[in-house]
Image: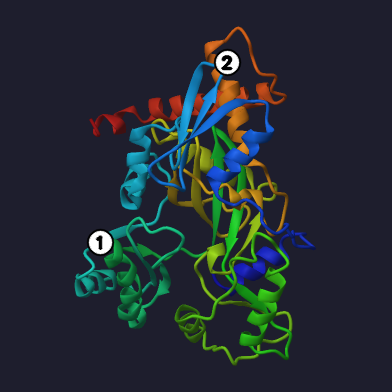
């Protein structure tokens, strides 16, 4: 994302206020699951594991028979093959390309191969790239819009994270636009949220450092954002420098100034729900992408858009255990209870398939089943239409 994208988001939406959540809100996906189940009418129990922070959640029918177990960080309705295909970003890209789904071009290098990576990256092009550790999460070690003269320094930033977990490094095409997270629950697209990097808005008087201070004071009013302030860092200094700015710069009044290009709330960013704003083409892509992965029904897809009606969006990666807090606590737009949606779907689908004599009364039962069957039909259609391509994988 750049300043132009940031300005586009706020000038092409009608959000006139931010959402402020109470202190102490539940944000962890497993905790959100348990919070919903405790107030629901569904039978369940939770079991301790070797990890004191992780529990297994057993779900039961009305007669007490076990339906399934949700083991953090896995959804039981997602297949082992699907998780395998998506755990490696480069494998995911190659697989999705077989189905005509647009993804960035990535190359993998050992952390020691900086000279080879730089030479191959800029051999035939001077276009900027993204450097990040393989299987990085939460934006750790990700450096975007890397030019040839910033390559070495950016590589070192990524390398410091890659070596910590012995990860190779990815050099990826830099894609213009803004990053969104599309969350699908048991075949139903529930939300598309823009992950806005940390930014400030100029007042014509204050320095960027002062504006950050004001922004952090505002974030303290929101229970969800208060624990994720904008921290002055070398990464922000480097990003400002690349835009001929520093902490002492005074932006003009109402000027949008990005502090980082990495889209992550943990770095001081914000969230904007655009589910009801984007075009039908954008809404279709995450469903098509997830349906092309065998055995996946729930997932979070990172998608790059250049506009709300982008006719050629691009899939960055697929996560099989999405962070549902992103859709639950957007800074702008309507939040959604994805924990409720998930468990209502699981129980509805189980009752549809196995027809137990005694059933839970689920208000949206037919809607959940409808979306599930529609998604299954989409997957079958995709697999049948691409049978010849799939044969080469066997």
Between label 1 and label 2, give the one nearer the viewer. Answer: 1
x 60%, y 50%: residue: 325
Label whose residue precedes the other's in the sequence (1 or 2): 1
x 50%, y 21%: residue: 67
Residue 3 higher or lower than 75, as above or below? below
Which of the two residues, 60 or 265, is positioned nearer the viewer here? Answer: 60
Which of the two residues, 105 or 232, is positioned nearer the viewer here? Answer: 232
Residue 134: image location, x then y, percent? 32, 58
Q: Horizontal placement of 392 versus 362: left or right?
A: left
Regarding residue 340, the answer to whether it shows in the image is no
Residue corresponding to mark 1: 166
Query: How many discs mark residues in the rendered view?
Result: 2
Residue 362 higher or lower than 84, as above or below? above
Residue 17 higher or lower than 352, as above or below? below
Mark 1: which secondary structure? loop
Rendering quarter of residue 151: bottom left
Q: Horizontal placement of 314 versus 8: left or right?
A: left
x 46%, y 60%: residue: 138
Residue 259 is marked as none
């Amino acid at each position: 994302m750049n300043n132009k994208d940031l300005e586009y988001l706020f000038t092409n939406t009608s959000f006139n206020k931010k959402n402020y959540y109470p202190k102490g809100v539940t944000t962890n996906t497993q905790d959100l699951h348990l919070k919903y189940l405790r107030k629901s009418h569904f039978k369940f129990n939770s079991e301790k594991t070797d990890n004191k922070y992780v529990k297994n959640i057993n779900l039961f029918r009305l007669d007490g028979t076990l339906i399934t177990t949700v083991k953090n960080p896995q959804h039981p309705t997602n297949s082992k093959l699907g998780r395998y295909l998506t755990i490696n970003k480069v494998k995911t890209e190659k697989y999705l390309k077989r189905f005509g789904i647009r993804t960035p071009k990535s190359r993998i290098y050992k952390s020691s191969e900086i000279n080879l990576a730089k030479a191959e990256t800029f051999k035939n092009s001077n276009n900027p790239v993204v450097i990040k550790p393989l299987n990085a999460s939460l934006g750790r070690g990700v450096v975007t819009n890397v030019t040839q003269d910033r390559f070495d320094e950016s590589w070192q930033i990524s390398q410091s994270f890659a070596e910590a977990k012995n990860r190779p490094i990815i050099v990826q095409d830099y894609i213009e636009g803004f990053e969104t997270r599309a969350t699908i629950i048991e075949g139903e697209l529930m939300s598309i949220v823009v992950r806005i990097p940390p930014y400030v808005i100029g007042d014509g008087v204050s320095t960027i450092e002062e504006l950050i201070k004001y922004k952090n004071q505002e974030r303290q009013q929101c229970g969800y954002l208060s624990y994720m302030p904008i921290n002055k860092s070398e990464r922000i200094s480097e990003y400002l420098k690349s835009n001929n700015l520093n902490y002492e710069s005074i932006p003009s009044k109402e000027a949008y100034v990005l502090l980082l290009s990495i889209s992550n709330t943990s770095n001081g960013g914000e969230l904007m729900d655009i589910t009801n704003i984007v075009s039908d083409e954008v809404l279709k892509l995450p469903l098509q992408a997830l349906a092309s992965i065998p055995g996946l029904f729930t997932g979070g897809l990172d998608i790059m858009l250049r506009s709300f009606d982008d006719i050629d969006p691009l899939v960055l990666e697929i996560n099989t255990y999405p962070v549902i807090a992103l859709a639950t606590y957007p800074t702008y737009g309507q939040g959604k209870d994805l924990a409720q949606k998930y468990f209502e779907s699981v129980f509805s689908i189980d009752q549809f398939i196995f027809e137990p004599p005694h059933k839970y009364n689920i208000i949206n039962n037919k809607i959940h089943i409808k979306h599930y069957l529609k998604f299954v039909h989409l997957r079958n259609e995709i697999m049948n239409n691409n049978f010849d391509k799939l044969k080469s994988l066997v």
